[in-house]
Image: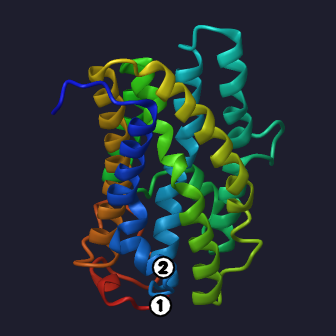
């Protein structure tokens, strides 16, 4: 590693290179999800496990918000809480994700309970929340920069799932439409913060490592889904088993 401080433009390019090589749109599970190659049961497993990630994002953002030193920064960050929690019951991203899960045939109370999620999902998401709470503020903000890459995966997901699954509708996928504008807005703010605050090669490398960590968090959730619900189909004890399936049966992509 060179000791030379990168310019802000070089740092941004290095951050974007991480997304190009490590973002979870490259994962085989997502390729199958977006290509219409999963059964309804497998898509249900994805929505159920992803809910835990969605539900913990406000906790992550609240932890980060409490550490911001100025009112200006706190005002800029706090709308993320409203985006996910909503401003009243039934609004916000979490409520929309629950509607997505219900649209796929999952019971809302079961999804909210998180009883059926995979252990790896819980460990990965909890590790992300702890990272944001415990590491430097720069690293915490940098870990959110996966939002730079999300509009592309969202557009691909909407078109691919609508084309590939007759049990998916635009109403089912309504969660994603606001994210097409929210994610770029949030990413622009976080990227500007990181480029301004990472003033040494050491802090720049810390920011890059934080983004790699976040990509790993997203990637390992899909590793767990693939292992449990695609191949070899080994579902963890206590985790979601779709109706009519035994653990191991989903490796063949049988429909629910």
* Separation (CA) of disc 1 from disc 2: 6 Å
Q: Is residue 108 above or below residue 91?
A: below
Callout 1 touching callout 2 (CB < 8 Å): yes
Q: Which comes before the other along the chain, label 1 or label 2? A: 2
Coloration of the structure image: rainbow
Residue 200 position by quadrant? top left
Q: Which residue is mark 1?
A: 255
| Residue 100, position as x, y percentages in the image | 67, 65
Residue 242 position by quadrant? bottom left
Identify which residue is drawn at 70% across, 47% down: 182
| Residue 246, position as x, y percentages in the image | 33, 81
| Residue 190, position as x, y percentages in the image | 56, 32
Identify which residue is drawn at 69% across, 57% down: 180
Question: Is 31 left or right of 99, judged from the image as shown?
Answer: left
Residue 41 circle label: 2
| Residue 64, position as x, y percentages in the image | 53, 22
């Amino acid at each position: 590693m060179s000791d030379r401080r990168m310019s802000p433009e070089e740092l941004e390019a290095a951050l974007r290179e991480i997304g190009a090589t490590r973002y979870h749109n490259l994962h085989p599970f997502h390729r199958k999800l977006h290509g219409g190659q999963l059964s309804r049961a497998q898509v249900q497993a994805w929505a159920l496990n992803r809910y835990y990630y969605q539900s913990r994002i406000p906790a992550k953002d609240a932890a980060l918000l409490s550490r911001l030193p100025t009112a200006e920064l706190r005002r800029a960050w706090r709308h993320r809480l409203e985006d996910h929690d909503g401003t009243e019951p039934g609004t916000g991203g979490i409520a929309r994700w629950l509607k997505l899960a219900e649209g796929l045939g999952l019971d809302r109370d079961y999804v909210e309970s998180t009883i059926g999620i995979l252990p790896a999902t819980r460990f990965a998401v909890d590790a992300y929340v702890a990272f944001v709470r415990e590491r430097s503020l720069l690293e915490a903000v940098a870990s959110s920069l996966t939002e730079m890459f999300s509009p592309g995966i969202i557009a691909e997901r909407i078109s691919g799932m609508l084309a590939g699954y007759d049990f998916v509708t635009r109403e089912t996928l309504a969660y994603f439409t606001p994210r097409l504008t929210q994610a770029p807005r949030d990413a622009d703010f976080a990227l500007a913060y990181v480029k301004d605050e990472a003033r040494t090669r050491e802090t720049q490398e810390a920011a890059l490592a934080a983004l790699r960590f976040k990509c790993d968090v997203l990637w390992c959730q899909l590793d767990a889904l693939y292992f449990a619900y695609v191949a070899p189909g080994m579902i963890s004890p206590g985790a979601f088993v779709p109706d009519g399936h035994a653990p191991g049966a989903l490796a063949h992509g049988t429909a629910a």
